Amino acid sequence: MLVIGSGPGGQKAAIAAAKLGRRVAVVDRKEMVGGVSLHTGTVPSKTLREAVLYLTGLTQRDLYGQSYRLKEDITVADLTARTQHVVGREMDVVRNQLSRNRVAMFPGTGRFVDDHTVAVTDATGQEELLTARHIVIATGTRPARPASVEFDERTIMDSDGVLNMERVPRSMVIVGAGVIGIEYASMFAALGSKVTVVEQREGMLDFCDVEIVEALKYRLRDLAVTFRFGETVAAVERHARGALAVLESGKKIPADAVMYSAGRQGLTDGLDLGKAGLTADRRGRIAVDEHYRTAVPHIYAVGDVIGFPALAATSMEQGRSAAYHACEEPVNPIHHLQPIGIYSIPEISFIGRTEDQLTDEKVPFEVGVSRYRELARGQIVGDAHGMLKLLVSPEDRRLLGVHCFGTGATELIHIGQAVMGCGGTVDYLVDAVFNYPTFAESYKVAALDATNKMREIDHLRD
């Protein structure tokens, strides 16, 4: 098996095939081992967030006062020191895992010669032909760049360029209120930048619970973030002392930096897909079936290059599934219940359906809520804004959705995932004993809230 790309999907496909006794090779540029996820995506951005929270002392201000800061003048060097350390360590982990499993690494970029052969070009321009029975495309994505915008990586940049900024900007315009835009908006706002988010749609994160998105908006406005919904950036003018974002409505927003977060583009243009009998759509994405097979049955594609949900976690599972299928090893389909995590400040995470989805589908539900300010752990860590919401079926008492906002949301969601995945009911959470004081205890509080409401309805009927 030959895997093109060493990100989360490519790694897991290669290791799974190696464990099943196949000879496996991975093609990727030497400096990009671990893929975009490790170098410009998930790992550096989440590490940057951790550095921001630590150095600004933001999460401690409820306890020590609004002026509390761990470091007064935070520089880009302060932030990137931690990022570089983590990325370096993670690269070692990936290399070690591949070599331990006897996966051959071919440094360079790959392009198809035919449907079984890939030409690998190394950094010196030397070319080598590799032939494989099965090929997995795991090339990932890059930030999409509007053709009308002149990116200079100093004043006008995409989400990759943000990691190489020379200084923390005093003011910033972020174009696009998707997941990446909102994550960076909250980070720079926490650092003290005056952030304006411009979004052509009338809202943000419309796949999330409405109440939780409102709570996040409130917290970001508290950090002096301005939202311009229903607005489009017509032009960005570069000036000696910064940039001027001109909106179609005529508004002008001055800023030290402008960051575009306009979706992502599949990295397929250099693959010569046509020679393998494949095509990509206009966003560079490759279509696959339920086994991650492309139109050519022995060529698979996994990860961001196949589109939604484009998460590191799902990419890993897709890679493993594709390798198992190629090796004719039985594999269960990926569970339909998948958690979504958004590393804004504070975090958002959810699994299952939202209130709006259930209402549209005419599915009855009861809501149980627990607020962090009512938990001892919330008081101890200084998070008075977080909340956990359970959506419960009054008919069979199963969980229909779990929505969390606040400290540790992306970890906390897995308790709900386990209960839902095993077909458990809200009564399990009512009867369970959770460590005290923990955030996990919020499940019991929310479960009691929901069951008390359901009991009231039952009593009225008696």
Image (cartoon, rainbow, N blue to C red):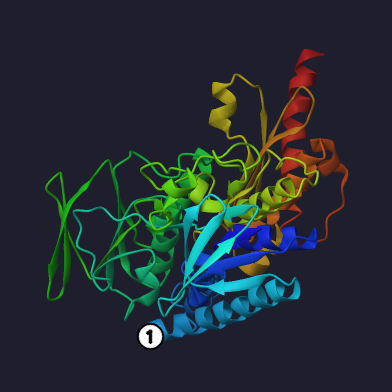
Q: Residue at x 57, y 69 (%)?
A: 34
Q: Nearer the viewer, residue 259 or 151?
A: 151
Q: Is residue 440 left or right of residue 288?
A: right
Q: Residue at x 56, y 40 (%)?
A: 288
Q: Nearer the viewer, residue 211 or 349?
A: 349
Query: Which image quadrant for residue 193?
Result: bottom left
Q: Is residue 245 visible?
A: yes
The percent coordinates of residue 443 (x first, y second) are: 74, 47
Q: Amino acid at mark 1?
A: Asp
Which residue is farthest top?
461
| Picture layout, residue 461 above or below residue 91 | above
Q: Locate the N terminus by quadrant.
A: bottom right
| Picture layout, residue 363 above or below residue 328 | above
Q: What residue did someone put label 1 on?
A: 73
Q: Is residue 284 left or right of residue 103?
A: left
Q: Is residue 457 left or right of residue 307?
A: right
Q: Nearer the viewer, residue 150 or 340?
A: 150
| Picture layout, residue 232 above or below residue 57 | above
Query: Which image quadrant for residue 406?
Result: bottom right
Q: Residue at x 70, y 48 (%)?
A: 326
Say which element carries label 1: loop
The percent coordinates of residue 52 (x first, y second) are: 48, 74
Q: Is residue 41 visible?
A: no
The percent coordinates of residue 78 (x first, y second) are: 45, 85
